[in-house]
Amino acid sequence: MSIRPILIHPDPRLKKRCDPVTEVTGELHRIAEDMLETMYDAPGVGLAGPQVGLMKRIFVMDCVKEEGATPRPMVLLNPEITWTSDEVNVHEEGCLSIPEQYAEVTRPAEVRVRWLGLDGRTQEEHFAGLWATCAQHEIDHLDGKLFIDYLTPLKRQLITRRMEKLKRERARA
């Protein structure tokens, strides 16, 4: 397992729709392990393929945050939302590709998601709270959408400028 570099916005790969996973291979298992290790190291609760330069419909998540609780790492291939609640939730979101920037985003409070597991079997689960927010955030990544796309153009532009500055500073370091 290895920690992969996380792409920082703006990067054209973060704005592209990802291709479906067509085959569950040993290589895909290794990538999923790397993505989980990268997510935990960051630290974050979710990480999508395009954030590590993989333009496939895969994301990992683990929203267990309680001290001493058992982690619940999940790998979702070709995920799709099959149902959303009418009730909405406002959550302060951040993103590993937009470090240290946070904003309130309104999304459905609950969702049902269907995906292919690493075992090749279709799975479906109902998510609420942080799990629902995370799943929607990561599926957005697979569709080339970032959480800042939900903000006003002015806020989005401000955050983008901060990220451009951060990338210049990191390039000089």
Image: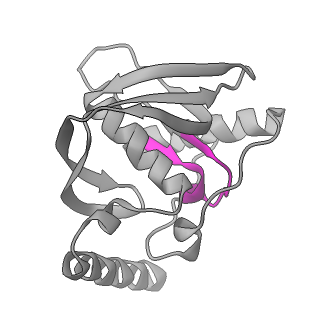
Q: Which residues are magenta?
A: 45-59
Q: Quadrant of residue 117?
A: top right
Q: Quadrant of the C terminus?
A: bottom left
Camera sees residue 42: no
Q: Is residue 120 left or right of residue 156?
A: right
Q: Name, please, the residue furthest toward the front.
A: 86
Q: Quadrant of the N terminus?
A: top right
Residue at image point 52% right, 69% down:
15
Residue at image point 59% right, 67% down:
16
Q: Is residue 87 left or right of residue 149?
A: left
Judge by depth and name the residue closer to the eye, 139 or 159.
139
Camera sees residue 55: yes
Which color mode does the image show? one colour
Q: Is residue 29 above or below residue 72?
A: below
> Is residue 47 located in the magenta-colored stretch of the structure?
yes
Judge by depth and name the residue closer to the eye, 1 or 107.
107
The location of residue 119, given as percent across then percent down, is 73, 20
Residue at image point 45% right, 62% down:
145
Give the number of marks. Answer: 0
The location of residue 148, given as percent across then percent down, is 31, 66
Residue at image point 83% right, 34% down:
25
> Is residue 127 located in the magenta-colored stretch of the structure?
no
Judge by depth and name the residue closer to the eye, 41 or 102.
102
Q: Is residue 3 left or right of residue 110?
A: right
The location of residue 60, given as percent across then percent down, is 52, 37
Q: Is residue 131 above or below residue 44?
A: above
The location of residue 38, given as percent across then percent down, is 51, 45
Q: Is residue 143 above or below residue 28?
A: below
Q: Quadrant of residue 89?
A: top left
